[in-house]
Image (spheres, grey):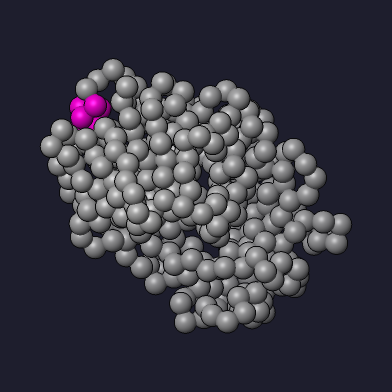
Amino acid sequence: MTRVLISGAGIGGLALAQALRQGGVDVVVHEQDPTPQTRDQGYRIHIDANGNAALRACLPPAVLDRVRDTSGVNGDLVATFTQRLERVFAQEFPGIPPSDLSNVDRDTFRRGLLTGLDDRVFFGRTVAAYQVTDAGRVRVEFAEGGSDEGDLLVGADGVGSAVRRQLAPGPGPRDLGLRCVYGRMPIDAATEPLIPADFNRGFCWVAGDNGAGAGFAPVRYRDRPGGYLMIALVTTPDRVGGDLHAMVIEATSGWHPTIKSLVAYGDSTSFFPITLRASDRIEPWRSGPVTMLGDAVHAMPPAGGVGANAALQDAATLAAELLSGKDLLDAVADYERVMLPRGFDTVENSVRMMGRLAGG
């Protein structure tokens, strides 16, 4: 039986693991985080039509049901506003069926994707390097000590991918010169009346006259009361530091009073920064028993919410190739011929969109 090692238990790695296990493949996931809740990586994730199709292709019915049932209530609007809360642009998406997802909470989504994989996902194991053996198999070495061996290694280990550094050495994703500070405002009896109607319907972007911009989007859980409004301020690195909640309040101090209230009611402990990065297009490497997916190979900024969907597409495409009955190396090569151009096209679109949002 083919044995597949996956480095990274993020969205793409777990979707691939679900698909392969469902297809009868011996799959093991090694994740550097001690637990699934170790890192702050974001809150609300937009799932588009490509992401929905990939989830249907990858997940067993029971897991897909759990992911759907614990997702957010579907939204139907993307809009942009001035800091005076004047609507500049709006696009509506009517008629999204309940069987589709339009948004998920990242942590809840990850827990759903872990369903049934308890004996296949090992936390606290950092894949530091790999070696292709004389027999054509792949042996991975863990930073904590120890090793594992399989027929294929998939680097799903994110922006700082150790697999990428060895498989496709060269400059990593470039810093776009922007930082995103994420936070959350709990939705409860006190804050519910503060949320503008449009902000309740989907993702809304507010462009400030001071060069900063902020995205607002709700997660209202399908399976339980409550939820939160995601706040995502995009600004320059020099503004980010110290008390992040206070910094976001200051950056939006000249904006419409409604927006200032939303920010003020944010949970001060929920704010954290990330560096916005993007991968440059690279030449295909020599295909073999090591490959990559998602941010490990084509990292992108969060504009348009496309990063998670790109990783899910990669997982679905790779799983389909590996389960097609082809020779393993032929399947990997065919996957890479699709993944690389598609992934970098998506990166470039995301960078252009980020530039427009940030006023670049």
Rendering coords of residue 100 (x, y %): 60, 31
Q: Can residue 25 be seen from the camera position used here?
A: yes
Residues shaded magenta: 328-334
Residue 151 relative to residue 182: left or right: left
Residue located 20% across and 57% down the image: 169
The answer to whether residue 252 of the structure is visible from this angle is: no
The image shows residue 312 at horizontal and vertical percentages of 44, 38
Picture residue at 13% right of the left edge, 37% below the top: 134
The furthest residue to the top: 325
Q: Which SS does the magenta portion mostly show? A: helix
Q: Position of residue 84 (x, y in %)?
A: 67, 70
Of 129 and 159, nearer the camera is 129
Residue 318 versus residue 247 in the image, above or below: above
Q: Answer left or right for 74 relative to 300.
A: right
Q: Is residue 139 above or below residue 200?
A: above
> Is residue 125 placed above or below 325 in the rendered structure?
below
